Structures are given as C-alpha cells and as structure tokens.
C-alpha cells in the first residue's frame, strides 16, 4: 500500500507515459512519430465502432477498459478525445493503419481482423498496465505518442500448435493461451487433441474415447529413457460445450482453431477404449491401456472398413464443432510392424492393390482427404502424408525439416513450415545443465529470431504455397501450464516477429534490437502473469542461466 503511494500522487499530476514506437512486438512495417501533442486517454475517452468492428469494440472494453479504468463509453464518430474503429476495404483484410493525434486514435483495418490487430498494437502503446486484468491506478490518464503506424502481416497462417494429449491443459488454460496468441498477432491455434497418451475431445457416438481414453494410470517423468515415473493418474478432456466455448472465444480474437485427430498412428488411447480399432489378429488389444510412456507406440489403427466408419463418425462430430477450412489428420510416425505381422492387413493390401504397408498408410490418408473434400473442408497432415501422393487441395505441416515442405510446394500443395530443428518449443532453449528436462536441439531465442519460413530452394511461384508458419508445443515434459509458459516464452515473441514481419535474411536480422524491444515485452509478459524463461541478465551468478528448482 505504502509503496504504491508515490504512484497515486504522481498520477494526479501527469499522465503516465505509454510505450514508445520502438518497443512494439512484433515491430510494425512502418511506424512514424508525427509532430504534435500526444493523445491522452482517460475516463472521458469515448469509443466509436464502425460497422464490422464489433469484435474489437467488445475486446477493447473488456480488456483495455478493465485494465486501464477506461469506460470507453460509446461516442460519436467525429467526437473529440475518442477512439475510432473503421473498416477500410482499400486495405488488405489483416492490414491496419493506426493514426494517433491529440484529438483521436483511429484504427482502420482492411476487415475485422485488421482492426483487431491494430487494437493489439494500441494496447502495447499504453504500456504494461494495459496487460493487467484489473485497474491499479484509478483516475490515471495515459499518454500515447502522436504517430502513424501502417502494418500488415507477411503470412496468413501464423500459428502455434499445442499438444494437450501428452499433458492435458484445462479449458481455462487454453482460453488464456488464446489471449496470449492474440497479443502476439498469431491467428491459428492447432489443437493436437489425440495421441497414444490420451484422447481429449468428447465424441458423443463413441463415449468410451473419453470415458476410458482420457486417463492414464501414470506418466513417464522426463524423457523416454528416464527411469522415473509420476505414479498418479493423469487425464482430462473437453466436453463438446467446452470445445464450442474455445472455438467461439478464439473466433472473437480472430484466431482459427484447427483440430487434429491423429490417424492411423498415435492411436493407442483410442484402441485401448475400443479394442476392435487395432490389429486384433496380432495383439490382444483388449489388454491395452492408455500409453504411459513417450515415443511412438506400435499400436496403430487396423486398415479395415470398420475403422474408417468409426473415424468418419468422429470426424462428423469434429466438423460440427470446428468450422475451420483445414482439418488436421496427423499421419505422422505410423510404425508398420503390426500391419506386416497381420494376415488381415496383408489381405487388405492385396484387395486394395496398394504398394505394401506404405500403400496402406496413404490409402488411409487419401480416404479422409476425399471424405473431407466432399464436405467442403481441406485436409492437412504432417509431412509423412506426402509419401503416398495427395489429392489436390491437401496441405502439409512440414516438421521433419524443410524437405517435406519443399517437396509439397514444388508439387503444388500448400505448406505450413514448422521444422523441428527451428520451432519445436519443447526443445531446450539453452545448452547449460540447468534447463528443466533438457531435451532435443538447443534452440535459443536468437535461433528462433533467425528462423526463415521460406527456404531459398523455392521459386517465387512455389513460395506462394507457403501459407505460413507455426511453432509446435509438444508436452511430454511439460506437465502443467507453468512448464508450458517456460518453454513457450520468450521464444514465441521471437516467433511472432518471424511470422508477422518481412525480416531481412537470417544472418542480417537485428537481434540486438529485438532484445532491446524485449525489455518492454518482458514487462508486458509480467503483467500477463506469464512464467517465461528469464533472460540471462536476470539470473546473476548462474552463468546466465535461471536458477535450479
Ligand atoms: C515428433 S512432430 C512428433 C511428436 C513428438 C515430438 C517431440 C510430430 C508430427 N511427431 O509426436 O511429441 O516429435 O518433439
């Protein structure tokens, strides 16, 4: 209380300065200070929202209004001291122009998303207070620099994938992550909902998927060769109403949720719930449980008509819940051991006339490709799905390096670049011994900042197939939200610049400048309550690493 008193006193005298233009993340394409007095926002500031800008109007009141104590009462378009939101069709849908002078703040977006990204920039200009949930300094006016900002994203797909199968994240945590994505101008949330270790979405016609498939008895603690176990049950799932809430909330933030149901591999949780889904002539699938360790399970779906019908039922419900054009079908890491050993699978290979077990895998994917296309959706899968040839319109998440993405783009397929060597945020961010569960490649903040989504091998025409990029958050060693925060931040801030901005070639990028801007961004993340990995300077005596424990 006492320690806050000087702030309260100061607040009555002058407006608190917001951030400067040099502190924005992602940095906008163009930001210019203009001569003139700053805009001072206070209780008298009004908000006028033109047609098509309602989502941003609601968001501004709920978020900025609550954090800064600004009622943002509805005003007239031409009123003084007002914030004005407009759709301006001469701009690209996600582009915006933010003009700030003494009299008003005007955000023009090409369409509703552009207005919303402009509002995200405005929030950063207010300073860290704007990222809190409650207003701490009643009556404080905030002063914003007179400026013009013109901005537009480089890519239309700026995503983060979250694996909620290995470790479940309760609904509130997911909603919080959507807020965090929006604050970084990311617009795709790839929701990895099923895996060997858990099935996380309620499917009404197959209730055992969640009744039996959403809990495991124990979990491997650490990486797959660790001798340690967490000896307690782990699980959870989203009801269909939870999913509707998540999708609706994402939509209000101009984020598309792309659901992933992984087939035909990574399916042990489903098989443990419905044993007929597996190769029953090879293993006693009735004895299977939800997998409790990491790696790639050999228990994969059997290539039967029955299995196809079962999953068509799953996807029918998924399509009802998720309006996104793209539906992710996984398709990665499907060991063929059981299909090799199964007389039924071998008979199927002959019957279908496909090339061995690999042919079965592509038969599986092609089936859902056709099925989704017939319903007006587009299939996307991990780059293994390329191996059997794809229908026109199908897209690839390139995770095993750039190779799959390059091949896909050259074959005319759309690609989302997410190579594990660059943007797998489960991998450690420092080479020192203190990283909690140090797995994978070392990928520092700087490495992520220097990641280039479009490889030089692509011609200009081929590069148009790169829809964008996403960072993938696999949660084998992230048992709760704090651990997810630690792995994701600050690297997601570097990633969002890569996804949003047209940066110079990797070696020429101004990482020092980015780090300077990060100083302001850490204050925002603090206000948001993000448990990021602290920068080296904050951990004196640790050799630049955060303390243990
Ligand atoms: C590979 S990326 C996987 C995931 C793991 C991840 C760990 C992909 C399609 N498959 O199942 O969680 O590596 O980094």
Image (tube, rainbow, N blue to C red):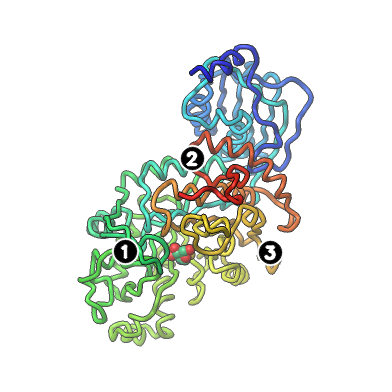
Q: Which mark, residue 179?
A: 2
Horizontal side of residue 470 vs 343, given as left or right? right
Q: Is residue 87 above or below residue 210?
A: above
Query: Quick one: which residue is furthest to the front in this view?
Result: 541
**Image spot of residue 144 (x, y percent):** 66, 25
Toward the right, the furthest residue is 35
Element under disc 3: helix
Badge 2: few (under 14), some or many (20 or more) residues near its Cα, within 10 Å? some
Instruction: Tell me the quarter of the picture where residue 375 sits.
Output: bottom left
Q: Identify the residue under disc 1.
A: 292
Between 543 and 365, the one lying in front of the other is: 543
- Please name whichever residue, 114 or 141, is drawn nearer the observer in this view of the structure: 141
- Which of the two discs, 2 and 1, sits closer to the camera? 1
* Crowd tier of the residue under label 3, counting other residues whose Cα lies within 10 Å: few below 14, some 14–19, many 20 or above: few
Q: Which mark is residue 461?
A: 3
> Quick check: can you spot residue 381?
no
Tell me the CA gap for discs 1 and 3. Answer: 45 Å
Residue 136: percent from left, percent from top: 50, 22
Of the two numbered discs 3 and 2 in the rendering, the one whose residue sits closer to the viewer: 2
- Does residue 76 appear to the left or right of 510 in the view shown? left
Report the side of 465 relative to 328 (left or right). right
């Amino acid at each position: 209380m006492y320690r806050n008193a000087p702030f309260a006193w100061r607040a009555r005298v002058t407006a608190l300065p917001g951030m400067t233009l040099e502190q924005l993340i992602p940095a906008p394409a163009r930001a210019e200070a203009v001569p003139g007095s700053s805009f001072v926002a206070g209780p008298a500031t009004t908000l006028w929202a033109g047609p098509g800008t309602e989502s941003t109007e609601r968001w501004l009141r709920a978020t900025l209004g609550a954090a800064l104590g600004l009622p943002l009462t509805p005003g007239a378009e031409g009123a003084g001291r007002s914030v004005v939101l407009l759709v301006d069709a001469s701009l690209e849908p996600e582009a915006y122009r933010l003009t700030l002078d003494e009299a008003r703040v005007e955000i023009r977006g090409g369409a509703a998303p552009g207005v919303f990204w402009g509002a995200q920039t405005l929030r950063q200009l207010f300073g860290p207070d704007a990222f809190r949930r409650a207003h701490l300094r009643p009556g404080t006016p905030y002063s914003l620099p007179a400026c013009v900002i013109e901005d537009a994203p480089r890519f239309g797909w700026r995503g983060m994938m979250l694996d909620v199968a290995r470790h479940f994240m309760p609904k509130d945590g997911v909603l919080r992550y959507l807020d965090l994505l929006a604050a970084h101008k990311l617009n795709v949330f790839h929701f990895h909902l099923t895996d060997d270790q858990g099935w996380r979405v309620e499917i009404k016609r197959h209730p055992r998927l969640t009744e039996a498939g959403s809990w495991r008895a124990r979990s491997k603690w650490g990486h797959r060769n660790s001798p340690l176990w967490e000896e307690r049950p782990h699980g959870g799932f989203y009801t269909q109403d939870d999913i509707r809430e998540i999708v609706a909330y994402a939509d209000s933030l101009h984020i598309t949720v792309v659901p992933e149901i992984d087939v035909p591999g990574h399916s042990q949780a489903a098989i443990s719930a419905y044993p007929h889904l597996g190769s029953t002539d090879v293993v006693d699938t009735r004895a299977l449980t939800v997998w409790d360790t990491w790696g790639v399970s050999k228990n994969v779906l059997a290539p039967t008509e029955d299995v196809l019908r079962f999953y068509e039922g799953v996807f029918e419900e998924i399509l009802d819940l998720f309006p996104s054009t793209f539906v992710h079908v996984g398709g990665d890491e499907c060991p063929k051991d059981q299909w090799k050993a199964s007389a039924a699978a071998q008979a199927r290979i002959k019957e279908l006339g496909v090339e061995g077990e690999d042919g079965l895998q592509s038969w599986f994917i092609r089936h859902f490709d056709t099925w989704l296309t017939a319903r007006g959706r587009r299939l996307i899968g991990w780059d293994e799905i390329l191996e059997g040839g794809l229908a026109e319109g199908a897209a690839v998440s390139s995770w095993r390096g750039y190779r799959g993405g390059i091949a896909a783009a050259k074959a005319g397929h759309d690609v989302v670049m997410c190579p594990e060597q660059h943007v797998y945020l489960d991998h450690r961010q420092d080479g020192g011994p203190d990283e909690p569960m140090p797995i994978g490649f070392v990928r520092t903040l700087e490495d992520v900042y220097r990641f280039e989504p479009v490889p030089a091998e692509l011609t200009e025409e081929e590069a148009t197939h790169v829809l964008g990029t996403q960072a993938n958050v696999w949660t084998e060693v992230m048992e709760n939200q704090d651990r997810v925060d630690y792995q994701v931040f600050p690297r997601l801030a570097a990633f969002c610049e890569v996804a949003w901005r047209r940066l110079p070639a990797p070696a020429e990028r101004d990482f020092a400048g980015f780090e300077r801007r990060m100083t302001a961004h850490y204050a925002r993340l603090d206000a948001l309550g993000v448990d990021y990995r602290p920068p080296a300077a904050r951990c004196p005596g640790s050799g630049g690493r955060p303390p243990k424990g």
